[in-house]
């Protein structure tokens, strides 16, 4: 399934993703959080390639938000903004 991520202005996605990266301290981020972030980046940056079967972009973001919410609320908030932006586009 191709996501609609390609239809969202690439600069807007890139800006939100960069904000998220800036709030995540590499020393304090778990391996699972790094893996989820990599999956989100894959979905966003590899627009010309088919998306991985599992998890989808939405699922990856939802898992990242859940994982970040307790220890990294600011990062979780930015990830929620990305999810909301995608949802407003019907993704």
Image (tube, rainbow, N blue to C red):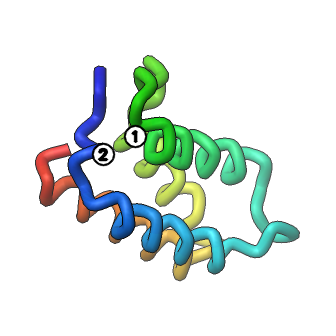
Residue annotated with mark 2:
5
* Residue 63: x %, y % from top left: 49, 47
Residue at figure coordinates x 60%, y 51% from the top left: 37
Give left or right: position of 90 versus 67: left
Name the disc covering residue 57, or none. 1
* Residue 18: x %, y % from top left: 55, 71
Contact check, label 1 and label 2, Cβ < 8 Å:
yes
Give left or right: position of 59 versus 64: left
Residues packed near mark 2 inside 10 Å, few (<14), some (14 to 19) or many (20 plus): many
* Residue 42: x %, y % from top left: 54, 40
Nearer to me, 86 or 55: 86
Residues packed near mark 1 inside 10 Å, few (<14), some (14 to 19) or many (20 plus): many
Nearer to me, 36 or 43: 43
Quadrant assignment for the C terminus = top left
Residue at figure coordinates x 55%, y 48% from the top left: 41
Residue at figure coordinates x 46%, y 64% from the top left: 14
Residue at figure coordinates x 49%, y 70% from the top left: 76
* Residue 65: x %, y % from top left: 48, 59
Label 2 element class: helix
CA–CA distance between discs 1 and 2? 9 Å
């Amino acid at each position: 399934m191709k996501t609609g991520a390609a239809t969202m202005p690439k600069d807007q996605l890139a800006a939100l993703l960069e904000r998220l990266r800036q709030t995540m301290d590499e020393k304090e981020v778990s391996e699972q959080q790094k893996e989820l972030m990599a999956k989100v980046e894959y979905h966003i940056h590899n627009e010309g390639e088919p998306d991985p079967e599992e998890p989808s972009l939405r699922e990856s973001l939802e898992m990242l938000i859940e994982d970040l919410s307790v220890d990294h609320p600011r990062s979780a908030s930015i990830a929620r903004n990305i999810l909301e932006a995608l949802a407003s586009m019907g993704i």
